[in-house]
Image (spheres, rainbow, N blue to C red):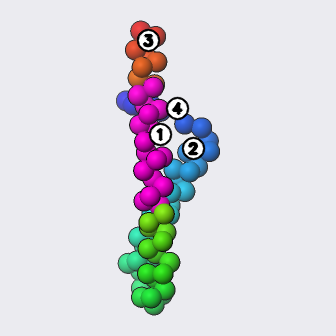
Amino acid sequence: MKRANLSLPQLGLIVATRGMLAAGGMLLIANRFSEAKRKKMGWPLLAIGAISTIPLAMGVIHNITEAKAAVAEAA
């Protein structure tokens, strides 16, 4: 099992970006609003969520590799 040490603010950012991705995607496929409103609201949410996910994912991967190194040193 892989472990990453994340602080509460880091975890909150990850959850928020995933939520933005989901909300943007759902707005784009929903039929509740007109097509123009859906695109106006959905694409920015989707783009911001996707763009902000990249550095957060890199941070998590970095934390996983640091955790592996710490376990290897302890053994």
- Residue 41 shows in the view: yes
Chain-order first, disc 4 or disc 3: 4
Q: Position of residue 38 (x, y in %)?
A: 46, 82
Give the vertical position of 57 relative to 27 (above or below). above
Residue 25 image position (x, y, % from top left): 41, 70
Describe residue 26's horizontal placement relative to residue 6 as left or right. Answer: left
Residue type, mark 4 in image? Asn
As drawn, the label of residue 5 is 4
The residue nearer to you, when weighing 16 against 39, is: 39
What number is the disc on residue 59? 1
Q: Which mark is residue 36?
A: none
CB within 8 Å, label 2 to label 3:
no
Secondary element at image label 3: helix
- Say which element carries label 4: loop
Q: Earlier in the sequence, mark 1 or mark 2?
A: 2
Precedes in sequence: disc 1 or disc 4: 4
Quadrant occupied by the N terminus: top left
The residue labelled by disc 2 is: 10
The span shown in magenta is: 49-66
Can the viewer see residue 18?
A: no
Nearer-N-terminus badge (3/1): 1
Q: Residue at x 42, y 50 (%)?
A: 54
Q: Earlier in the sequence, mark 2 or mark 4?
A: 4
Three-letter code for the amino acid on which mark 2 is drawn: Gln
Magenta region includes residue 55: yes
1 and 2 marks in contact (CB < 8 Å): yes
User: Is 8 drawn above or below residue 43 in the view shown?
Assistant: above
Q: Which residue is under mark 3?
A: 73
